[in-house]
Structure formats: C-alpha cells, structure tokens
Amino acid sequence: MSWSGWTKERLLEEAEKAMRRAYVPYSKFRVGAALLDAEGRVHHGCNVENAAYSPSNCAERTALFRAIADGHAARSFQAIAVIGDTPQPITPCGVCRQVISELCAADMPVIMGNLQGDIRVMTAAELLPGAFAPSDLNYGKKD
Ligand SMILES: [Zn+2]
C-alpha cells in the first residue's frame, strides 16, 4: 500500500519522529502521529499534556488540527499513522476516533504501530462505527 510514494512503514517513521517531541511530563507516555495530506506532505502531531490534565491533547488531534489550521480541507487526507510504546499497535482514544470520523474520509486508512514494528491498519469508519455525524445535528430541529 502506498500514497504519493509513502508507505505505512515510512509514515510510522515520521510518526516516531513526532513521538520524540511529545510534551508528557506527567504520564511520560509518548505518542506520535503523521498525517498525510492530499499533496503528499506529512503533518506531525504529538501528545501535549497540561498540569490541569483535561486540556491535554493527543497526537492524532494535534496533527489534524495543525493541518486544518494550515488550510487543508476536512476529508482531504490520505492516511494517518500513529505510534506509541505499547505491546500491541497503539489505537486512537475515543475522542480522537470521533475527530477522525469528522475530519477524515470514512475509508481513510489509520495506520497503527508500536516500536517493535507491529502494524495494524483500519479505516476511519471501522474505528468508530455509528459515529455521531454532522447530519445528526439537523435531526429534531424545530425551526
Ligand atoms: Zn486521542
């Protein structure tokens, strides 16, 4: 599988570079992400924690929000790779799955990896069946 010449292994290498920049003074649990845009460029994301805990942000959302802020359109991305130091390939948390379901195409691959080289690929839709969608906001509107 490749996208604009990228492979899942090379995207995971990019995610690992981002992982090294994680700001995780509390959990020490580093996560990195590499989001491939429609032009074949990579946007890095890492988790960024906060002393107040709840303002912390995951690597996947950091990469997606960065790319959106840089002018890329929602659902224009080719793939996202996520890596962490976990026994199995790391999986996005529920909050990130919801954000991925809105900002990425349903069939976009989510490449999950760990530092041992294990890889698992699922689509955005497979990661969050029955996701709350923008169309759900219109249901039940009275005016
Ligand atoms: Zn998350």
Image (cartoon, rainbow, N blue to C red):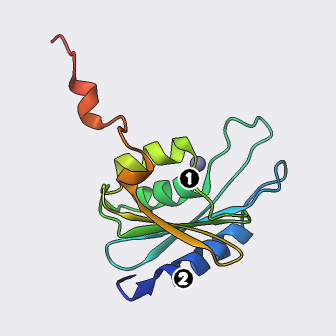
On the image, the x and y values in percent for residue 39 come to: 33, 77
Judge by depth and name the residue closer to the eye, 17 or 10: 10
Judge by depth and name the residue closer to the eye, 125 or 30: 125
The three-letter amino acid code for the residue at tag 1 is Pro
Q: Measuring 65% from the left and 78% from the top, which residue is drawn there?
A: 117
On the image, the x and y values in percent for residue 54 come to: 69, 35
On screen, residue 141 above or below 127: above
Question: Of the numbered discs in the image, which one, if any, rests on residue 92?
Answer: 1
Ligand 1: does it lie within 8 Å of the C-beta at label 1? Answer: yes
Q: Answer whether labels 1 and 2 touch (C-beta < 8 Å).
A: no
On screen, residue 74 above or below 42: above
> Counting residues from the N terminus, which is met first, the one under dot 1 or under dot 2?
2
Indicate the quadrant containing the N terminus: top left, top right, bottom left or bottom right.
Answer: bottom left
* In the displayed structure image, the side of residue 119 where residue 71 appears, left or right: left
On the image, the x and y values in percent for residue 94 come to: 54, 42
Instruction: Name the residue furthest left.
Output: 143
The three-letter amino acid code for the residue at tag 2 is Glu
Secondary structure, mark 2, is helix
* In the displayed structure image, the side of residue 26 where residue 5 appears, left or right: left
Secondary structure, mark 1, is loop
On the image, the x and y values in percent for residue 53 come to: 74, 37
Q: Measuring 47% from the left and 75% from the top, which residue is drawn there?
A: 42
As measured in the structure, the alpha-carbon distance from the residue carrying label 1 to the one carrying label 2 is 18 Å
On screen, residue 130 above or below 70: above
Q: Measuring 69% from the left and 52% from the top, which residue is drawn there?
A: 48
Q: Quadrant of residue 17?
A: bottom right
What residue did someone put label 2 on? 9
